[in-house]
Each structure stands twice: as C-alpha cells, then as structure tokens.
Amino acid sequence: MPITRQHFQPAWWLKNPHLQTLYPALLRKSPPLQRQRQRLITPDDDFIDLDWYGDTRNPLVILLHGLSGSSASGYILGLQQALSINGISSVAMNFRGCSGEPNRKARSYHSGETEDIHFVYQYIRQCHPDSALAAVGFSLGGNVLLKWLGEQGENVSLQAAVAVSVPLVLSECASRLDTGFSRVYRKHLLDELKLYIHNKHRCLTHHRLFAEADKLNQLGDLSDIHSFWQYDDRVVAKLHGYQNASDYYHHASSRQFLSTIKNPTLVIHAEDDPFMTPDVVPNAGELSPQVLVEIYTTGGHVGFIGSKDALTPSYWLDSRIPAFLKPHLQPD
C-alpha cells in the first residue's frame, strides 16, 4: 500500500499543534463505560490487567495506550465507545504497572517490549479462536504494535491493525522533545516516569520483593535526569538489557519492521506532531504491501480534534479507526 497525503480539518479554535495535543489530554470528557477487568498472570509471575468492553461474540479489538497512559486514557475510552457503536468489542491492555497498581518486577514496559502483547494475543486467541481480531496502538503503544507485527509476520492471526502518532524512530523523537515548547511534554512525561519508579520501589519494598527493589536502587538518584536520552540510558536500558540509550533506540524503533508486516495496517501520522521530526516518516520502499501510511498536515500528537459545530469538539480518530477496521472484521 502507498504513502498518501490526506486532509484533516481541525476545529478552528484548535489549529495549533500544541492545542491539538493538549486539548484531549486535559479537557476530553471520558464516557462512563461499564467494563470488566481481568488480571492475567505472566510467565515471570507478574501481572497484566485487561479492561473488556462489549459482547465478546462480536469482532474484537486489542487497544494499546501510550507512554504514562492507561486503559483509563480518554482516547482509549472514547475509542472503546466508538467501536461498540459499530458492533465491535474491545479489550484495553494496561502495560505493566499502568493499571493503578505497581507491577511486581523491576522491569516494566517500553517502546520495544513485545513479549507482553504477544502473551495477551495468545491468551485471547486461545479463548476466542474463531473471533475476528484487530489491534490499535497509540504513540508508544503504536510502536509496540508495529514492531510486534513485523517480528511475527505470518504467525499472527489478525485481520487488521491501526497505529496512531507512532515514534517510528525513537532517537529522533527523543531529541525533538529537547527543543522548543516540546520540552513541556518532556518534563511532564519524565516527572510521571520518575514517580512511577518511586512508587514501584516503595511497593516492591512493602511486599518484601527485595531483589527486585534492589534493581531500582541500583539506578541511583533520578532527580538529575532532564532528557529522554538520559532516562532511557539510565533506566530503560539498564532494566531491559540494552547497552545504552542508542542501543535501545536502534533495536526498539518500529520503522525497520514495517517491511515485514503481513496484516492490513493503517499508520496515521500528523506532520505537525510536536513529538516528531520529518525524518521519522518512512519512504514507500520501506513498507510492506499491507501497510498504508496516511500523512496529515495537522493533528498534533494523538489529537485530530475537529468540530461538529462552532464550539463542540469532534474526535476524528473515533470515526477513522472504526471505518478502516470494520470492512476487515466483517465475515467474508
């Protein structure tokens, strides 16, 4: 499939990419969904929490959130509601430690961690072997999704996938967050991640999991970390077996996996995304025939907020994603 340039009309009061990015994160009202939580115990005796919505006899979509997000993020809840309206059920996966309770291991989640999504996929396939199945990932979750699809190739029985606002080249995105207004996002995310590590250490110690807590102790004082290059070098690389941040970025960036994806996959990207640079966008020669990249001039990062009328926001992703998935999930 090609790389195509598409048009998205932002709300007139949200034309700035930062407004597109911040409005849904700060002001979106999440629908009150009655979901069912399920805890899976992982092979290494940790846990992953899933939040199901809808009749599982319907086609099913796995949802993956972004960095410092969760199944409670507005874009996840909004999409679960939109999918349900289209007769599609969903299960939102919380990455380790993101469901409101610290996980039991020093390791957690990162942009290249695909073991947990594969574990969840295998569980769902075992429980629902005949269901039409798709997956959607946002930001970090999109990178995880694309990397996993490329790694697995024909081994995944998935009807379709969508990845939104993906940091396809992690080194470029880490450096982009060191510039201009994007440093605001960097500080917020790093503060969240440092708190995540602090809370996890306290929880591991409380539960007398001292060997795991010591792995966090060995990271040292994180207060002097002010960039993702530093955080990923000091924390992610050390906890997850990479030599350093450069090694992590090299192996975990999903752009290199686009050529081996065997499932119909839509990648949605905004040129004004404040987490990106133009260099993250792949060229057509890097794409599998199954991958379609849609590039929009505007949209921000996981934004794409239009308007129904003069002052009512419209969440365009909640219509575009089901529109792409639905034909692939319908019976032949």
Image (cartoon, helix red, strand yellow):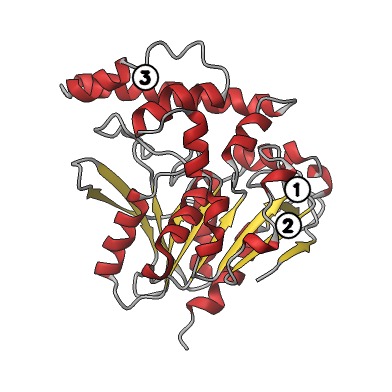
In the visual, does 123 lie left or right of 220? left
In the displayed orientation, state which residue is furthest to the bottom. 332
2 or 3: tag closer to the N-terminus: 3
Give the SS element for disc 2. strand
Q: Residue at x 59, y 22 (%)?
A: 187
Which mark identifies residue 198?
3
Residue 211 x %, y %: 19, 22
Label 2 neighbour load within 10 Å: few <14, some 14-19, many 20+: some
2 or 1: tag closer to the N-terminus: 1
In the visual, does 46 lie left or right of 198? left
Which mark identifies residue 271?
1
Q: Alpha-carbon distance for marks 1 and 3? A: 35 Å
The relative height of residue 197 versus residue 139 in the rendered view (above or below) is: above
Disc 2 marks which amino acid? Ile
In the visual, does 252 lie left or right of 290? left
Q: Does residue 158 appear anywhere in the picture?
A: yes
Disc 3 marks which amino acid? His
Residue 191 x %, y %: 51, 21
Q: Residue at x 41, y 10 (%)?
A: 221
Quarter of the rendering containing residue 189: top right
Give the SS element for disc 3. helix
The relative height of residue 235 versus residue 124 in the rendered view (above or below) is: above
Circles 2 and 3, Cβ within 8 Å, touching? The answer is no
